[in-house]
Each structure stands twice: as structure tokens, then as C-alpha cells.
Amino acid sequence: MYKKIAYLVTLAIVIALIIPVGVFAGPNQPQVFNLTIIHTNDFHDYEPYALARKASIIKQIRAEKKNILLIDGGDLSIRGPYHKVFYGELEMAVLNALKYDVWELGNNEFKAHPDQAVTDEKLYNLINQANFPTLCANVRTQAGEYLPGVQPYIVKQVADMKIGILGVTSNKVKKYPQASNKIVEDAFTTVKTLIPEVRKASDIQIVLSHAGLAGDLQIDKDLADSGISFIIGADDHFVIPQPIYRSGGIPITQAGGEDNIFLGRLDLTYENKDGKWVLKSHKGMLYPINDKVPMDTEIKRIVDRFLSKAKSKAA
Ligand SMILES: [Zn+2]
């Protein structure tokens, strides 16, 4: 009798231990992954001290969030007052100090100077200076290779997740005499061709595009089922506070550029559905950058150093 009771008590304890596990780890509990992306594009040498203000917000977000990517969509230089002094080196020094994860070459990086040899020298100088990967999938050398130091995409590990980021630049590059020594493929076609490979290598796929909003809308229209979960745009300096999104499509954003100075932020939630990670919800925002945003002292010092060099060069 005693034995029977002891057996029943043990059985009850075992069941009590098992059932809650079954309830909480059941198939109705989705696996969720939160990712924050901080994005910039199209600096164009405009107002270097704005970089120090952006840095304050970047460091603030980093203190509050985990699972962060910091990325730039290109056009570091050209048109601003320091273009012909630094050719984007000031901006690249700041991106390095802030430990960016990746950047995409903008069209302007391919026409930094009227002379082809000088443009190439400045372009490769920036690529070599970057302490983080440079993307550009749709420009190749005449031998058909990706440009030296440049990758078509990266797979970045964030927590347990593999984030595939594919980069393309504007089709405009094809028309530049300085880029006549390169093969420029259509941005959309390149994304369409490469995205299955990126998908095989990663859990989440993102396009970092300097193809302009029209190019991004075409990706959304024709490649919505390709696995791409977000398009982070650049080139035409659109101010897009909330991502452009149609139900079932791919959200698109862009953070202004040049004299429209903003820092972009995306908070994305992915959910695992039948072994695939899908974007469940997204929230965008643009931080306006003005003198109300304090300057980060580390980045301000870098900008100071460059600008005092510019002054001594001009003197
Ligand atoms: Zn631009």
C-alpha cells in the first residue's frame, strides 16, 4: 500500500514537472528576434560637425539596445566644401571611429575627380581605409572581378542570427566617363541574380541600396517573394520618417542626405515561421540633426583635426 502511494506521489510530481515545460515550450510560442538598424546615407561632405551630433545618438542607442547594425549607404563626398580637400577621408575616419558594420559605394564615389586615374586612386583609398566591409555587387573590373577590396554581400553574425546584407549602387555609374574602365550591371538584375545565394547563407536578408527610390520600388514590386525583408535606400535624399510599405511587400527607407540631415533608425521584429525568419513588424524613425543635439567629443575631435588640416592647407 505504502509503495503504491509513494509511486502515485512520485508520478504526480513528475507530471507536475513535465506539463509546464510542455505548455511554455509548445509550438504556439514563436521564436522572436529583435534587430535595430542605425543607418546613414549621402553625407556629401555637408556640415562635418553633424557627424559628431549623429555620434551622440548612435552611442545612446548602443547603450540602450543590443542586436544593432550600423550601416551607411554611400556618397560620402562630392559637392560639399571639403570634397576636393579630403575626398571622403574625413567621413571615413568618423565611420571607422564609430565602428560601422558595413557601407555601400555611392555613385559619387565613382566620379570624385574629372580624371579617371585620380578618381580610381580616391575610390580605392576610401575602400582601403575602411576598417569594415565595402559592398558593391553590380560593378566589376573589365576582367569581370568584383572591385579589389569590395564584396557583393556580407553575412554578419548578430547574436545567434546570420544577417545577409547585399549592396548595389546606382545605374548612373554606367554613364560616367571615369567609370568606363569598369563593368556596371543593372542594380535590379544583380539583386535578382544574387539574392538566392545570400538567402542560402543567411537567416535574414537585407538590401543596402544606392540605386535610388525608383530602383528600390522595382525590387519591392518584383522581388517581394525573394526573402528580402528590408531595403535601406540612398541616392535621391528622400526623407522617409516611416518606411514606405505595402502589405505583402518589402519596406523601404532612406534618411535624407546632404542638407537634409537625419540619422535613421529601424526597430525590426522577426519571427521564425516553419524554420524561416520573417519580418513580423517594423518601426522607423529619423532623428533630426541640429544644434540641439550635443556633439560627441571623440568624433568632434576627429572633425576638428581634419578641419585644422584644411585650414593649414588653404593658408
Ligand atoms: Zn547622393
Image (cartoon, helix red, strand yellow):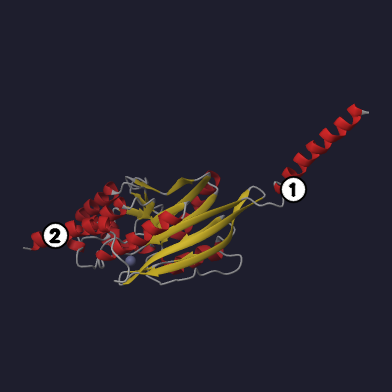
Q: Nearer the viewer, residue 307 or 118?
A: 307
Q: Is mark 2 within 8 Å of ligand 1?
A: no
Residue 290: x and y in percent read 31, 71
Given the current orientation, which residue lies at the most extreme right position? 1
Q: Amino acid at mark 1?
A: Val
Residue 24: x and y in percent read 71, 48
Residue occupying image coordinates x 83% and y 38%: 12
Given the current orientation, which residue lies at the most extreme left position? 315
Q: Residues within 10 Å of mark 2 (few under 14, many from 20)?
A: few
> Nearer the N terminus, badge 1 or badge 2?
1
For the N terminus, the image quarter is top right
- Tell whether label 2 touches label 1 (CB within 8 Å): no
Question: Is 228 located above or below residue 248 in the figure?
Answer: above
Q: Which mark is residue 23?
A: 1
Count of picture labels: 2
Question: Is 261 located above or below residue 10 in the figure?
Answer: below
Residue occupying image coordinates x 82% and y 33%: 10
Position of residue 117 in the picture relative to residue 53 (left or right): left
Alpha carbon distance from label 1 to label 2: 64 Å
Position of residue 26 in the picture relative to residue 228 (left or right): right
Q: Nearer the viewer, residue 57 or 267?
A: 57
Q: Nearer the viewer, residue 94 or 223?
A: 94
Residue tagged by mark 2?
Answer: 308
Tell me the SS state at disc 1.
helix
Q: Residues within 10 Å of mark 1 (few under 14, many from 20)?
A: few
Q: Nearer the viewer, residue 282 or 170?
A: 282
Quadrant for ligand 1 reads bottom left
Q: Amino acid at mark 2?
A: Ser
Position of residue 141 in the picture relative to residue 13 (left or right): left
Given the current orientation, which residue lies at the most extreme top position? 3
